[in-house]
Image (cartoon, helix red, strand yellow):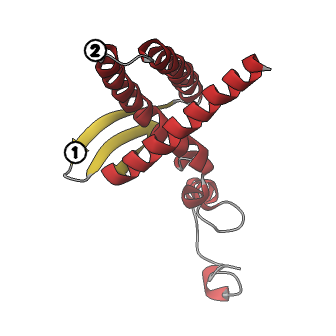
Amino acid sequence: MTKLEGNDRWQNKMLLTDHVEQYEQMYGEEGESKELTDVRAILSNEERTMVRDLILLPHIDKMLSKSMAEIEHSGNVLTKMYLMAGRYIQNSISKDTWALQKELKRRNVRFISDEQNESILYYKVFFRGYQERFGIMREVMRSEISQSLTRYTFELGGVLKDHLK
């Protein structure tokens, strides 16, 4: 019930039909603002996670490339094995990056780097005609990268176990 309902004073006021239509489009039948409840105007948690992962994956790939270059120049006996494992993980990262890019494109979500603070990286996320600022702290990036590398390593371990059986 709105403030005007039950108030006889407002019943005899003239209201243009354009204004009634505009009010109904904006607030609907319930009187609740559609702008606040419009699902398209909010980036879902799943989409935020996908954007975060797509930001982190190139960093992981760069870290792996550096580590593989160091291993290649070392005199370690297991150099070939480490390089094969690194290539497998890089291949998995490439597949995940491609899948995330495809899914975000399907959902009409894209992002660009905005600014870098001492401890926070900011990105502008454009989605379905809206824009949002997305920030990620460097410490969070480090922990997420560590978790992702652990997940990829366990995936590799599972593949190796399957081949040994």
Is 87 in front, or is 114? 87
Image position, residue 49 (x, y; %): 53, 43
Q: Looking at the image, which residue sits at the far left? A: 118
Mark 1 touches mark 2? (CB < 8 Å): no
Q: Measured along the vertical axis of the image, is residue 103 above or below residue 121?
A: above
Q: Quadrant of the C terminus?
A: top right
Q: Is residue 143 left or right of residue 154?
A: left
The reply to whether residue 102 is in sight is yes
Image position, residue 58 (x, y; %): 39, 27
- Helix, strand or loop at label 1? It is strand
Q: Nearer the viewer, mark 1 or mark 2?
A: 2
User: For the residue marked with disc 2, what is the amino acid?
Assistant: His
| Quarter of the figure with residue 24 | bottom right
Dot 1 or dot 2, earlier in sequence:
2
Is 134 in front, or is 92? 92
* Separation of marks 1 and 2 at Cα, in angstroms: 33 Å
Q: Looking at the image, which residue sits at the far right? A: 165
Image position, residue 79 (x, y; %): 41, 16
Q: Quadrant of the N terminus?
A: bottom right
Is 71 in front, or is 103? 71
Image position, residue 108 (x, y; %): 53, 29
- Helix, strand or loop at label 2? It is loop
Is 101 in front, or is 87? 87
Q: Residue at x 57, y 54 (%)?
A: 22
| Quarter of the figure with residue 72 | top left
Numbered badge on residue 116: 1
Q: Residue at x 42, y 36 (%)?
A: 56
For disc 1, the neighbor class at 10 Å (few under 14, some 14 to 19, many from 20) is: few
Numbered badge on residue 73: 2
